[in-house]
């Protein structure tokens, strides 16, 4: 089926053009994450409460919402990165292909092997460009055809042409946008199943941002993406499914994040079911 | 070979069991290293306490060592304790003002080039072995004049200077420039601002640094071997004489064949250790107190 | 009284003319500057005085002193070679033992220890550094020495005796081996405390970036933390080495003395520093004193070189990484 260009008009915000293949019906989508009743707490204080949603394969799923609504906390639960924070605790289940990864018996190292992450600020290793990509491959035992793997990852990250002549140069000599693409190459080189992205373009200029959005689009067939973004237009551009988190308040003034609505992106932006979603996407608050 | 081709996505792990085993082994080694360090500390402190406590008595501080005596006589190390007081006291009197002045110069007046040159000199001074400092002062003051506590104190002061200067500098740079500017804006001259406004803010850090330097230097033996070791057994407070000190006394008693001397050495070591531990704790307490006070004043 | 006298009283103003620089400022700058100059001069004075004191020996024995194995106050024949060897062997072995321990402790304190243990254990390791060398030496003579002599040395000799290092244990007790163990204990806290601060300074994003790939903690440490801290670790090791070769008291208490070069660690020996310390009472003749100062000169040269090398490494290797990271923009 040919891609139909859809024009989404969001009241009082910028007109956004997207070219998107229409999503297959929900029943035909393969579930990779099944989150049920997830609560995440720092030092006993809840950051997110009662999040339940399914993430589907080979789609770009965006998490949007105002600052402080727990988007980063949520996404970091998906690859057990929050384990690194000493005061963190969680309840609820996260099933990855049916297996509960919150179970204490599951090794977070194995989880992260399959679920990669790109961070908000580019964090390349103080190594050469090539070694940034090759290091993970070597440690994880993917040493065969190392050079081809490196080239493939850099090509997929749309960085190969810019660095192919200086693979030995320090990664720190690249620009911010290039460094972020290097981090993406590094993450996909080890062939994860899912790539989590925590506001990957927030530190980048518009051109670099566009490059990264294009990346997600072209790599969707091989990986599944979950991207946190504070930029609604970005979500409208790249995401197939969008989840909207918002801040709820308690009686004693505590604040935590909750999943308000989760649906296909067009629906979220054109005909959201929840008033809070509508308020957010129309810019009435947040 | 991509994740796409996996029919059932299990949690793949190439060689993970082996990698996990290596990780666990390395973690155990790190735990072991820490345990070894703590154990060594424990063993040393325990040995000193166990062997020193029985010989610990007031006599240790009040009686002097007996010179040749056929009848058993209560012995002590009064001359050593007195000497250490004089030596450390004089050394502090020498090093404290100079250290503060050096720090003041480096933070308030010096250009960056001078600052790094003097800083380098301080670091080099810090790195000169204590025994070489002893030889240096020996050549400077002892040759031709004989040993004296003054020479010994000077050697100790050379060790203290970089420590006091560095500690003072660390707190001087913490004083916000707004404070200095406020003083200057009132029309108070620079020297007055520095002495009456800036320096008082740093007293906590200076005291902490000095206490630590004193603790360090009270236990130093090497600088005193060639400057203040040919001593008598009587208690003397005269800095022009060579005075006995606690670390040198321990050093000499340890070599003696008499087990009673060994017992006295352990007792003196216990006193020295207690003093140093107490001084370190006091310095740490002072540091946290002054840090919170400085934080509160912002 | 004329009207001219009735001028309205103005608050007395000091004129803006006059000295632009206050006398007090000049005085403070002068006094403080003298202190600073004095500190620099002190270093120079040390070098000069030590060279001066060694001059008679230098004139007498020349550079051959460094290769001559002898120390005879009776015949006035002196040489530093055996002490240089002793210094080298004790310091290098102590560093070899202390380095992995120090790295392990630093890793433990920054990555592995439960939060509640971190501060206490850090304080304990630092307390180890505060113990005076004479006390460690005392403990070495009466506690460590006998244990090593009676149990460890024979065991090592029995199992690894084919290595010349582990030859026949001497019956006397004091040995180079004991000195090595004592030195290891003494340099351990410095090296580990510098490494600990280095590891703490590794940016969290870097470590998370490695872990997010699915690497184990050790792999992350080996691949990211160590390379990042590489320069600082080298500087820490050099500083530890410098500390080891300058240690006189504890070493002389446990090393036993001797003027020969031999590989057997279980016999006695002497280092530059320990020989100087051991001779403090006997040195009578000017020749002998001068020979001792010659030893001190060699020691001084080595420590200064180590110190400068450590500084250079910190300035050049560590800085390069800092500059690179700054270029990435925010964060």
Image (cartoon, helix red, strand yellow):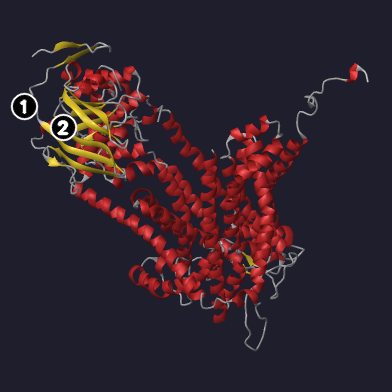
Q: Secondary structure at mark 2?
A: strand
Residue A27 disc label:
1
| Picture quadrant where residue C79 is located | bottom right
Q: Residues within 10 Å of mark 1 (few under 14, many from 20)?
A: few
Q: Is residue A38 left or right of residue C143?
A: left
Instruction: From this view, report whether residue B74 is shown above or below residue A85.
Output: below
Residue A53 disc label:
2
Q: Mark 1 and mark 2: span between their CA atoms?
A: 15 Å
Quadrant position of the N terminus of chain C in the picture: top right
Circle 1/circle 2 CB separation < 8 Å: no
In the image, residue A94 lies at what x, y percent? 17, 39
Which residue appears farthest toward the bottom when viewing the image? Answer: B71
Which residue appears farthest toward the right when viewing the image? Answer: C1
Depth check: C52 or C127 in front? C127
Depth check: B112 or B138 in front? B112
Q: Is residue C84 left or right of residue A112?
A: right
Q: Secondary structure at mark 1?
A: helix
In the image, residue A135 lies at what x, y percent? 29, 38
Residue found at x 9% / y 30%: A30
In the image, residue A84 lies at what x, y percent? 30, 43
Disc nearest the viewer among 1 and 2: 2
In the image, residue C317 lies at what x, y percent? 46, 39
Instruction: From this view, report whether residue B175 is shown above or below residue A225.
Output: below
| Picture quadrant where residue C62 is located | bottom right
Quadrant position of the C terminus of chain C in the picture: top left
């Amino acid at each position: 089926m040919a891609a139909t260009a859809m024009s989404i008009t969001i009241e009082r915000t910028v007109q956004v053009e997207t070219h998107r293949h229409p999503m297959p019906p929900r029943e035909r989508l393969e579930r990779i994450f099944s989150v049920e009743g997830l609560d995440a707490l720092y030092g006993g204080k809840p950051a997110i409460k009662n999040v339940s949603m399914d993430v589907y394969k080979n789609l770009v799923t965006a998490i949007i919402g105002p600052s402080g609504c727990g988007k980063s906390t949520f996404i970091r639960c998906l690859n057990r990165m929050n384990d690194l924070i000493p005061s963190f605790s969680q309840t609820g289940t996260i099933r990855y292909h049916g297996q509960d990864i919150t179970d204490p018996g599951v090794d977070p190292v194995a989880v992260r092997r399959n679920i990669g992450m790109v961070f908000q600020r580019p964090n390349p290793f103080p190594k050469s460009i090539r070694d940034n990509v090759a290091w993970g491959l070597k440690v994880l035992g993917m040493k065969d055809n190392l050079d081809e793997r490196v080239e493939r990852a850099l090509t997929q990250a749309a960085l190969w042409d810019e660095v192919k002549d200086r693979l030995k140069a320090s990664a720190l000599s690249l620009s911010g946008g290039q460094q972020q693409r290097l981090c993406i190459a590094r993450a996909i080189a080890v062939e994860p199943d899912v790539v989590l992205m925590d506001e990957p373009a927030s530190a980048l200029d518009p051109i670099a941002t566009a490059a990264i959005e294009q990346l997600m689009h072209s790599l969707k067939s091989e990986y599944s993406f979950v991207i946190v973004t504070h930029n609604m237009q970005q979500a409208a551009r790249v995401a197939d499914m969008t989840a909207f988190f918002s801040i709820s308040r308690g009686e004693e003034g505590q604040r935590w994040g909750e999943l308000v609505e989760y649906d296909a992106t067009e629906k979220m932006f054109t005909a959201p079911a929840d008033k809070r979603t509508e308020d957010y996407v129309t810019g009435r608050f947040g | 070979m991509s994740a796409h081709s996996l029919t059932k996505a299990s949690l793949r792990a190439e060689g993970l069991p082996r990698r996990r085993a290596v990780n666990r082994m390395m973690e155990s080694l790190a735990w072991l290293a820490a345990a070894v360090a703590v154990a060594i500390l424990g063993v040393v402190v325990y040995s000193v306490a166990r062997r020193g406590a029985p010989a610990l008595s007031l006599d240790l501080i009040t009686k002097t060592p007996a010179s040749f005596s056929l009848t058993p006589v209560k012995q002590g190390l009064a001359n050593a304790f007195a000497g250490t007081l004089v030596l450390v006291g004089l050394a502090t009197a020498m090093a404290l003002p100079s250290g503060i002045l050096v720090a003041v110069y480096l933070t308030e007046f010096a250009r960056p080039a001078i600052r790094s040159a003097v800083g380098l000199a301080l670091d080099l001074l810090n790195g000169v072995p204590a025994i070489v400092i002893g030889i240096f002062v020996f050549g400077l003051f002892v040759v031709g004049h004989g040993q004296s506590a003054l020479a010994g104190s000077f050697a100790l002061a050379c060790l203290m200077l970089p420590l006091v200067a560095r500690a003072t500098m660390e707190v001087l740079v913490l004083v916000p420039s707004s404070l200095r500017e406020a003083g200057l804006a009132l029309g108070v001259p620079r020297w007055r601002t520095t002495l009456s406004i800036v320096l008082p803010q740093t007293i906590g850090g200076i005291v902490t640094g000095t206490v630590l330097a004193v603790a360090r230097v009270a236990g130093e033996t090497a600088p005193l071997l060639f400057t203040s070791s040919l001593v008598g057994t009587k208690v003397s407070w005269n800095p022009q004489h060579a005075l006995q000190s606690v670390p040198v006394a321990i050093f000499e008693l340890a070599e003696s064949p008499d087990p009673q001397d060994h017992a006295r050495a352990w007792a003196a070591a216990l006193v020295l250790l207690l003093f140093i531990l107490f001084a370190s704790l006091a310095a740490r307490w002072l540091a946290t107190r002054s840090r919170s006070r400085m934080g509160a004043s912002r | 009284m004329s009207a001219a006298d009735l001028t309205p009283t103005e608050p007395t103003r000091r004129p803006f003319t006059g000295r632009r620089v206050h006398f007090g400022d000049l005085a403070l700058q002068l006094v403080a500057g003298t202190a600073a100059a004095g500190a620099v001069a002190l270093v120079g004075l040390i070098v000069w005085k030590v060279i001066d004191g060694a001059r008679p020996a230098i004139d007498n024995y020349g550079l051959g002193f460094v290769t001559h194995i002898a120390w005879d106050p009776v015949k006035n024949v002196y040489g530093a070679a055996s002490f240089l060897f002793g210094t080298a062997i004790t310091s290098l072995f102590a560093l070899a033992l202390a380095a992995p321990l120090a790295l392990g402790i630093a890793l433990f304190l920054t990555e592995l220890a439960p939060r509640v243990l971190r501060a206490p254990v850090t304080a304990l390791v630092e307390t180890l550094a505060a113990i005076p060398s004479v006390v460690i030496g005392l403990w070495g003579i009466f506690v460590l020495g006998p244990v090593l002599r009676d149990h460890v040395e024979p065991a090592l000799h029995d199992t690894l005796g084919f290595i010349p290092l582990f030859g026949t244990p001497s019956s006397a007790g004091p040995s180079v081996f004991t000195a090595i163990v004592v030195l290891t204990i003494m340099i351990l806290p410095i090296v580990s405390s510098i490494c600990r601060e280095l590891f703490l300074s590794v940016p969290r994003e870097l470590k998370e970036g490695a872990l997010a790939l699915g690497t184990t903690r050790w792999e992350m440490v080996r691949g990211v933390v160590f390379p990042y801290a590489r320069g600082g670790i080298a500087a820490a090791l050099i500083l530890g080495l410098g500390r080891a070769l300058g240690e006189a008291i504890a070493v002389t208490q446990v090393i036993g003395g001797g003027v020969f070069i031999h590989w057997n660690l279980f016999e006695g020996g002497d280092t530059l520093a320990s020989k100087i310390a051991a001779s403090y009472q006997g040195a009578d003749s000017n020749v002998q004193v001068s020979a001792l100062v010659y030893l001190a000169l060699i020691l001084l040269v080595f420590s200064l070189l180590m110190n400068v090398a450590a500084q250079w490494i910190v300035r050049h290797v560590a800085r390069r990484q800092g500059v690179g990271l700054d270029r990435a923009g925010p964060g």
